[in-house]
Image (cartoon, rainbow, N blue to C red):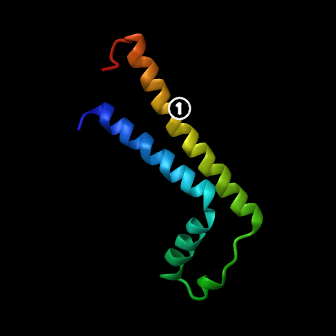
């Protein structure tokens, strides 16, 4: 797998993960509580504040935007025939 394929795979992962986090931030909260519960007692009783869910959504949107920007910049670089963009 060359550098371009890795970059495209990473950008695609970022888009999917970002959209998932933006649409369903509760999944991230559940995963965090499960991981925290392996070392602490009563971690399942934690409740996420609405502000934290908004922050997760914003992070997801930013991650998805970064993935889209990477794919767009690669496509533009390929069209322009920039050196090193193979």
Single out the residue that lies furthest toward the left. 1
Q: Is residue 44 left or right of residue 74?
A: right
Q: Where is residue 10 in the image (x, y as percent from the top left)?
A: 40, 43
Alpha-carbon neighbours of circle 1 within 10 Å: few (<14), some, or many (≥20)? some
Q: Where is residue 14 in the image (x, y as percent from the top left)?
A: 48, 46
Q: In this view, does 34 lie to the left or right of 82?
A: right
The vertical placement of 66 against 76, above or below, is below
In the foreground, 8 or 3:
8
Q: In which quarter of the image is the N terminus?
A: top left
Q: Where is residue 33 in the image (x, y as percent from the top left)?
A: 57, 76
Q: Is residue 75 left or right of residue 19?
A: left
Which residue bears the numbered disc 1?
69
Give the residue displayed 62% in from the left and 50% down from the top.
59
**Residue 83 figure quarter:** top left
Give the residue displayed 50% in from the left and 39% down from the top.
67
Give the residue displayed 38% in from the left and 37% down from the top.
8
Q: In this view, does 77 lie to the left or right of 57?
A: left
The vertical placement of 29 against 75, above or below, is below
């Amino acid at each position: 797998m060359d550098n371009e394929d890795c970059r495209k795979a990473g950008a695609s992962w970022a888009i999917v993960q970002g959209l998932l986090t933006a649409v369903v931030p509760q999944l991230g909260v559940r995963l965090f509580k499960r991981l925290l519960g392996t070392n602490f007692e009563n971690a399942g009783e934690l409740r996420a504040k609405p502000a934290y869910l908004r922050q997760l959504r914003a992070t997801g949107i930013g991650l998805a935007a970064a993935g889209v920007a990477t794919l767009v910049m690669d496509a533009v670089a390929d069209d322009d025939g920039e050196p090193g963009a193979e």
